[in-house]
Image (spheres, rainbow, N blue to C red):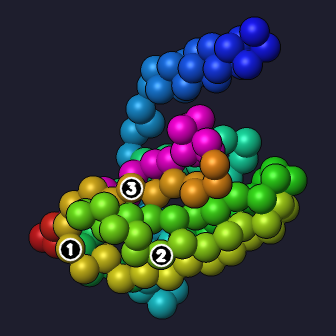
Amino acid sequence: MHHTRGVVLLAALVVIVSCAGTQAPVGVRTTERGEKSITITASSFKFEPSNIEARQGDVLIINVENISSMDHNFSIKDRQGEIMMSADVRGKETIQVKMRLKKPGTYEFFCDKPFHSTLGMKGTLEVRSSP
């Protein structure tokens, strides 16, 4: 009986998180060296911002700041769904990820810890074509 109640509560939480509104895309800022940069906070089951917009050809620096005491992960998939990179972020730590955005498209980022992305710890990186 207790197991069933737990499954029902988890399912309800997933539905609630899934129904949350989509965030408007957040642009990246340009650094002194011409690279693009953004800081993403990782907290209990969410990334903020969760929708990022950049341009093809950008060198993107992503600072992932874990503001919770729980360990998290920052992984990103390419357009075909293959893992491009994955890095662990310990509680109360910040890591830096640097990548060149070679192709336009939608890239998914997420926490690979069990159930974290299911509970809402995910987002998208929209790479627009260069003008």
Q: Marks 3 and 1, Cα distance to the nearest angstrom?
A: 14 Å
Name the quadrant of the C terminus: bottom left
Circle 2/circle 3 CB separation < 8 Å? no
Q: Is residue 45 above or below residue 3?
A: below
The percent coordinates of residue 45 (x first, y second) are 66, 41
Q: Is residue 47 above or below residue 77?
A: above
Q: Which residue is mark 1?
A: 103
The percent coordinates of residue 64 (x first, y second) are 64, 65
Q: Which residue is mark 2?
A: 85
Who's the residue at 79% across and 66% down the image? 90
Q: Which residue is mark 3?
A: 108
Residue 120 as seen in the image, left or right of residue 79 = right
Circle 3/circle 1 CB separation < 8 Å? no
Residue 128 as seen in the image, left or right of residue 47 = left
The percent coordinates of residue 70 (x first, y second) are 82, 53
Residue furthest to the front: 1
The mark lying in front, picked from 3 and 1, is 3
Who's the residue at 72% across and 47% down the image? 43
The percent coordinates of residue 23 (x first, y second) are 44, 36
In the image, the segment drawn in magenta is 115-128
Label 2, secondary structure: give it: strand
The tag earlier along the polypeptide, 2 or 3, is 2
Circle count:
3
Who's the residue at 58% across and 64% down the image? 74
Q: What amino acid type is highlighted by mark number 1?
A: Lys
In the image, which disc is placed on residue 17? none
Residue furthest to the left: 131
Mark 3 surroundings within 10 Å by alpha-carbon count, few (fewer than 14), some (14 through 19), many (20 or more): some
Q: Nearer the viewer, residue 20 or 88?
A: 88
Who's the residue at 54% across and 72% down the image? 86
Label 1, secondary structure: give it: loop
Q: What amino acid type is highlighted by mark number 3?
A: Glu
